[in-house]
Amino acid sequence: MINLPFLLFTLLLIWSIPSTHYRSKFRKIVYQTEDWKINIKPLFKKEILALFGNMYPENTTYLKTRNFYRIYLAVYLVLFLMYQVVKNSS
């Protein structure tokens, strides 16, 4: 039988698979570039401000991507916290 920590860990791994795609898409909008190197550069300040603020209020693509990315990260955080709680309690 599969135990709960293992199940949550597996869900966390599966949920993290598309994260690079979503982050890349969001960063390309924020930094206004199509260059692939944006994915390996550690530029965080503008990205964080765009995630929690409203950097381009007239850009509907940015707004939709930002809102989707927020939800994606929120689910990721909930899964991670659930895993930590279950792992530490067992």
Image (cartoon, rainbow, N blue to C red):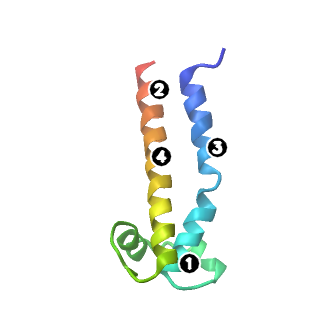
> What is the x, y in percent for residue 9?
57, 34
For discs 1 and 2, the disc positioned in front in the rendered view: 1
The residue lying furthest to the left in this view is 53
Q: Amino acid at mark 4?
A: Val
What residue sits right under mark 1 in the picture? 28
Residues at marks 4 and 2, CA–CA distance in whole angstroms:
18 Å
Q: Say whether disc 1 or disc 2 marks the residue closer to the N-terminus.
A: 1
Work out how far the residue at label 1 is from the one at label 4, CA to CA, in angstroms: 22 Å
> Residue 37, image x and y in percent?
62, 78
Q: Which residue is mark 3?
A: 14
Q: What whole-number distance in Å separates the C-alpha atoms at marks 3 and 2?
A: 18 Å
For the N terminus, the image quarter is top right
Which residue position holds label 4? 75
Residue 83 tag number: none
Q: Secondary structure at mark 1?
A: helix
Residue where numbered disc 2 is placed: 87
Precedes in sequence: disc 1 or disc 4: 1
For residue 6, what is the image quadrant?
Answer: top right
Amino acid type, callout 1: Lys
Q: Are marks 3 and 4 in contact (CB under 8 Å)?
A: no
